[in-house]
Image (cartoon, rainbow, N blue to C red):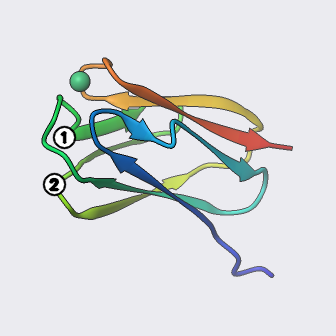
């Protein structure tokens, strides 16, 4: 049990699909982004609230760690904050 990691995948193609992902509080979590479309300005994804920023090369999986110590809803967005998605940490 101690090595359990929650992973969710988000496809980036003119937005984020799904737009909301859920994780359980207190369990290590990672979020994997794959950008499959050059549409829009989604080549960077970042979140000040969740503490990550990464570029997203086309058709490449990029995985970031998601802190799960606090329950709540946190936002990530593209480099220019035009598109956004949510991470919900469930209690
Ligand atoms: Cu943008």
Above or below, 85 against 26 in this view is above
Residue 63: percent from left, percent from top:
40, 61
Assign a secondary structure to mark 1.
Answer: loop
Q: Which mark is residue 19?
A: none
Q: Is residue 30 left or right of residue 1?
A: left
Q: Which mark is residue 57?
A: 2
Of residues 86 and 67, the one nearer the viewer is 86
Residue 20: percent from left, percent from top:
58, 37
Above or below, 86 against 18 in this view is above
Q: Residue furthest right?
A: 91
Assign a secondary structure to mark 2.
Answer: loop
Q: Which mark is residue 43?
A: 1
> Is the CB of the residue bearing disc 1 within 8 angstroms of ligand 1?
no
Quarter the C terminus occupies = top right
Badge 1 crowding class, 10 Å Cα cut-off, few under 14, some 14 to 19, many 20 or more, is some
Quarter the N terminus occupies = bottom right
| Mark 1–mark 2 CB contact (< 8 Å) | yes
Corner quadrant of residue 59? bottom left
Q: Residue at x 23, y 35 (%)?
A: 42
């Amino acid at each position: 049990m101690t090595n359990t990691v929650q992973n969710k995948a988000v496809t980036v193609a003119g937005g984020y699909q799904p737009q909301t992902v859920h994780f359980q509080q207190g369990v290590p979590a990672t979020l994997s982004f794959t950008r499959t479309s050059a549409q829009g300005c989604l080549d960077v994804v970042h979140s000040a609230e969740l503490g990550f920023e990464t570029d997203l090369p086309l058709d490449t999986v990029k995985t970031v760690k998601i802190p799960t110590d606090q329950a709540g809803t946190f936002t990530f967005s593209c480099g220019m904050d035009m598109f956004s998605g949510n991470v919900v940490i469930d209690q």
